Amino acid sequence: MQTQTKQKTCAELISARYSDRVHQFSELEDQCCNETLGHENYGYWSERFNESILAFDFVEANTFDNQPDGYYRLQFCWGGPSDEVRYYTKAEHERFYKITYSYMDWFDGAEIEVFDDIWHNIFNDFTDVI
């Protein structure tokens, strides 16, 4: 007799996945921006960062149900599972008022508010360009 293993929900997985992303991008930023490390990535923040993400775009308000505000989306991967950092704002080209991390899989998803400096640094880098 076979037993079926219950797959964990996004809510059960989100903390670990978020921790992985913070570590990934904090380490990459350190390698690229901290000269004292002497890492081969030093001076290549933009290049290495762009190789590590899928997209940075703006999602208009009301694109999805129950989404009254727009957000800048820093998308890491798409499909199932997918994850992204969202910078919520009242309008495009305005400063964000909240940052969240979203982890989604087929017909399931979870979102948590986040406060780590790395996401502020990344947003500032992108908005200097747009």
Image (tube, rainbow, N blue to C red):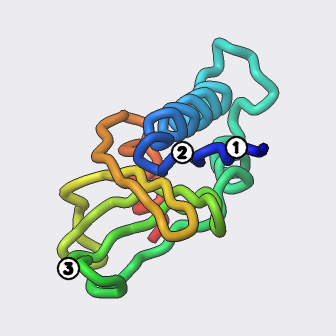
Give the residue pinned by disc 1: 3
Closer to the camera in the image, 8 or 21: 8
Residue sticking out furthest to the top: 36
| x then y, percent, for residue 67 | 26, 77
**Amino acid type shown at disc 1:** Thr
- Residue 24: give its label: none
Pair 3/2: label in front: 2
Report whether 88 appears left or right of 21.
Answer: left
Report whether 82 appears left or right of 86.
Answer: right
Q: Residues within 10 Å of mark 3 (few under 14, many from 20)?
A: few
Closer to the camera in the image, 18 or 47: 18
Q: Circle 3 — which element? A: loop
In this view of the protein, can residue 128 be seen by the observer? no
Q: Circle 2 — which element? A: loop
Q: Is residue 75 above or below residue 119?
A: below
Give the residue pinned by disc 2: 8
